[in-house]
Amino acid sequence: MDEKIIQDLWKAAQGPWETGVLPSTEQLSRARKSIPNTLPATGSRLDSVQRHILEEIVPAFNGGSISPNYYGFITGGVTPAALFADNVVSAYDQNVQVHLPNHSIVTDVEFNTLGMLADLFRLERSTWQNGTFTTGATASNILGLACGREFVLQKAAQRNGSQVTSVGENGLLEVLQAAGLSGIQVLSTMPHSSLVKAAGVLGIGRANVRNVCSADNVLHFDMDVLEKELARKDKATIVAISCGEVNTGRFATSGAEQMKEIRRLCDKYDAWIHVDGAFGIFCRGLEDTAEFATIKKGAEGIELADSITGDGHKLLNVPYDCGLFFCRHHNLAPQVFQNANAAYLSSGPSEGPSIPSPLNIGLENSRRFRALPVYASLLSYGREGYSDMLQRQIGLARAVYGWIYDSPAYIALPEATSKPELLDQTFMSVLFRAKNDNLNSELAKRINETSRMFVSGTSWQGAPACRIAISNWRVNVERDTALVTEVLNQVAQL
C-alpha cells in the first residue's frame, strides 16, 4: 500500500476531527451513486479502487469513533496502540480457533489478555480468566444466557431424577420435559435490548424476559418479587443484572450486600446470575475515592455472578467487533459450544499451560485475532491510563449534567432532588429532554443537524428524551463541555 495512503489514514484516525460528525446530503448522494449495481466483468486496478473508496465512499462515513463529540450508541474510539495492533491483525490474519502451542502464540496472547482484563476489573484471575472474545456485547449476552440455560436446566433435571440433563447434547425441549418445566425465565430490571434478543435466539423467548423492578425505582430490583419468581416450580430462572442501564448509565444493584443477597437467593433456587456489564464493568477500574464511591458501589459484588458481559469497542476504545465474556464455571461452556466428533479440531497433548481452544467455548469456529488490539492497549496505558481516560469521561458527563440541571431550557433525567445527588450518581451517560414539548419532539434531530455533535434519541417514562453517551478516549473536559453547552444553547434558541 502506498506510504502516503497509510499516513493519511493514520492522520484521519488519530488527528483532530476537522469535519462534521455527520456527512452532508451531497456526500451521501455522491457515494451512493458511485456504488456499482452489478459485479464488474473484469476487475479494476488497485489504485483505482483505492481512489474510489477514499474519495467517494469515505467522505460519506460519519465521525463515529473518530470524533470525540459523537455521543451516540456508546461509541468508543480507537487508541493509537489499538489501531497499530489492529493493522498487525489484518496483515498477519491469524485464525484464533484451536490452541496449538507448537504452532502459534495467538491463543496464549488471548488467554493472558483475558487475565489482564480480569486485573483491570478487579476480578480474581483464578476464577475469572475463563472466557473468550466475541463480536460484541450481544454475542457475549448470548453466551451468558446459553451457559445459564445449560446450568439451570441441568440442575432442574437432576432434581427430577432424570439422566437427560444437557441442552447442548439432548436439545431444549427434551431437557425441559425431563425437568418437568414449562420454560425458562430471565428476570431483570430494564434490560438492554441485546439481552432480550439473546433470549429470542436461544429459544428462551423474548416474552420470558421479565422486569422485576422496584415500584419506587424502576432501575432497581424488587427483592420480594424476585424471590417469589425464583421460587416458581414451573420455570427455571436466570437473573440478569444491568450494570448499567443503557439510558441513564445507572446500576441495578446498590452495593455488595445486595449482590450477596441475590447470590444467596439464586443458590437457594438453583438460578444463574448473568451480569450485562457492557460499559458499567469499567467503573471497577476506578480508584476508591469519595468522588466515585456511589457509581463504584453499583458494580460491587459482580464477582459473585456466574457470567459477565463486557464490551471492548465501548470504554476500552479498541476497534469494533470486540466483545468480552467471562464465566466462573470453566467446564460449562464446552458442554454448550464444543465441536463434537471433529478430531482434526483437537489441540492434542500439550506440556504448556492449560488454555482452552476458543472454538469449543464460543460461537465461532473461525475468529479474527480480536485480542491483540486489547493486549496492545492494556500494555500501553495500564490501569492508570484507563483510569485517567474514564475519569475524563465522567468529568465531562458531570459537567454537562450540571449545566443541564441549571438550564431554564432543559430537564435532567431521571429527575433528582438536588444537583449534588444527580452528579454523584452520574457515570458516563447524560439523559435529558427539553422543557418545551414542541422542541422536545425533534430535539435529537435538531442537535444532530448542527453536525457539531451527535446524540441518540430515546424515550424515558413514555416521553421523548436525548442521551449523550461519553466513551471516547480523546475527551477533553473543558473543550467538550464548551462545545456541548454551546450547541444545546443554540438549539434551545431556534
Image (cartoon, grey):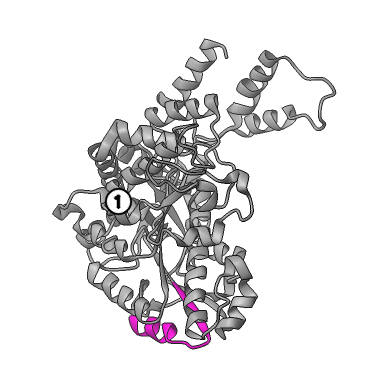
Residue at the right extreme of this rendering: 41
Q: Going 49% across and 59% down the picture, which residue do you hit?
A: 333
What's the amino acid at mark 1?
Arg
Q: Which residues are magenta?
A: 222-238
**Which residue was labeled with disc 1?**
125
- Taking depth in this image into account, of 265 and 66 the one nearest to the observer is 265
Please check the rendered image and state whether residue 227 is part of the magenta-colored stretch, yes or no.
yes
Q: Give the residue at the far top of this rendering.
A: 3
Residue 16: percent from left, percent from top: 40, 25
Residue, far left: 290
Between 369 and 314, the residue placed more toward the observer is: 369
Is residue 462 magenta-colored? Answer: no
Q: Residue at x 48, y 57 (%)?
A: 440
Front-most of residues 481 and 254: 254
- How many labels, in total? 1
On the image, which quarter does residue 371 sit in? top left
Secondary structure of residue under mark 1: helix
Q: Position of residue 235 (x, y in %)?
A: 52, 82
